[in-house]
Amino acid sequence: MPQIVVLTGAGISAESGVPTFRDADGLWEGHRVEDVATPEGFDRDRALVQRFYDERRASLADVEPNAAHRALAELEGTLGTGLLVVTQNIDDLHERAGSRNVIHMHGELLKALCRSCGVASPWSGTLVDEPACPDCGVRELRPDVVWFGEVPYEMDRIADALAEASIFVSIGTSGAVYPAAGFVQHARRHGARTLELNLEPSEGSHFFHESRQGRAGDLVPRWAR
Ligand code: BV8
């Protein structure tokens, strides 16, 4: 069971050039992210939502992990399974920095989920052209991403890890979305020491024993040493 659980959000990828939700002020092509990142939004306008994710999937080729991702990967090199990274991000920057113990609680851009057979397949292309599922052949692929109103992945495994952790660190998240925003309270209730590393105070800063403001690329390597 990991002694350290780290939760990451869009802020850890900001210095890699991946826009955060706040940067976009939650707007994309004039749509609120909550409207685009929902099953209803998908049913309302499949092409718009598929394009939204196709563009973000394509832009992964233009970004690289930064010092914060690398510091967490190096820390895992020292701690092994003693460190678990739970990320809200759907990019692959933790993995490309070398992290292996990573849970993508909100899914992954580089996977497509079949609405017919339920199988998630690795996917680096586009989905807007309605390709066939590699498993069942039906043309019902969607991004393998957890939208608002959908259940995040691996919640039991995350809850168990938070209950056992002696340290919980939140990096680069506004604490605006649940259940991720509630993890600090869960960890604290079970005796963990809690630390927030974020550019600015988040909505949940008051739940942490300690909150440090700054860029993840500066704060995380210093903390992880
Ligand atoms: C759930 C994937 C039940 C998609 C995302 C009414 C109806 C229905 C649901 C609800 C409702 N009211 C509340 C809810 C629950 C809802 C919710 O929380 N809504 C909010 C709007 C109130 N949640 C859900 O629906 C979730 N599901 O509740 O199911 C359940 C729960 C538990 C157990 C069983 C069942 C599912 C939510 C998942 C939505 N999908 N992403 C996609 O990516 O397109 S959400 C998305 O936004 C992210 O994944 C993340 O979770 C969230 C917030 O983003 P952040 O990562 O925090 O980024 P943000 O831009 O906000 O902040 C960046 C921060 O970084 C800032 O603070 C900034 O200062 C800082 N920063 C910037 N630069 C740097 C930096 N820090 C350091 N260094 C820097 N350089």
Image (tube, helix red, strand yellow):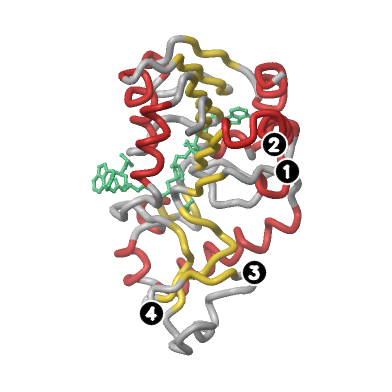
Distance, label 2 to label 1, CA atoms, is 6 Å
* Residue 107 image position (x, y, % from top left): 48, 55
Under mark 3, the amino acid is Ser
Q: Earlier in the sequence, mark 1 or mark 4?
A: 1
Q: Secondary structure at mark 3?
A: loop
Q: Earlier in the sequence, mark 3 or mark 2?
A: 2
Q: Secondary structure at mark 1?
A: helix
Residue 4 vs residue 183: left or right? right
Q: Which residue is mark 1?
A: 97
Q: Which residue is mark 3?
A: 124
Q: Which residue is mark 4?
A: 117
Residue 134 vs residue 116: left or right? right
Under mark 4, the amino acid is Cys
* Residue 142 image position (x, y, % from top left): 45, 71
Q: Earlier in the sequence, mark 3 or mark 4?
A: 4
User: How many residues crowd mark 4 within 10 Å: few (<14), some (14–19), many (20+)?
Assistant: some
- Based on the displayed image, in which of its 4 quarters is residue 122 positioned? bottom right
User: How many residues crowd mark 3 within 10 Å: few (<14), some (14–19), many (20+)?
Assistant: some
Q: Earlier in the sequence, mark 1 or mark 3?
A: 1
Q: Are marks 2 and 1 in contact (CB under 8 Å)?
A: yes
- Whether residue 77 is situated above or below residue 137 in the rendered picture: above
Distance, label 1 to label 4, CA atoms, is 32 Å
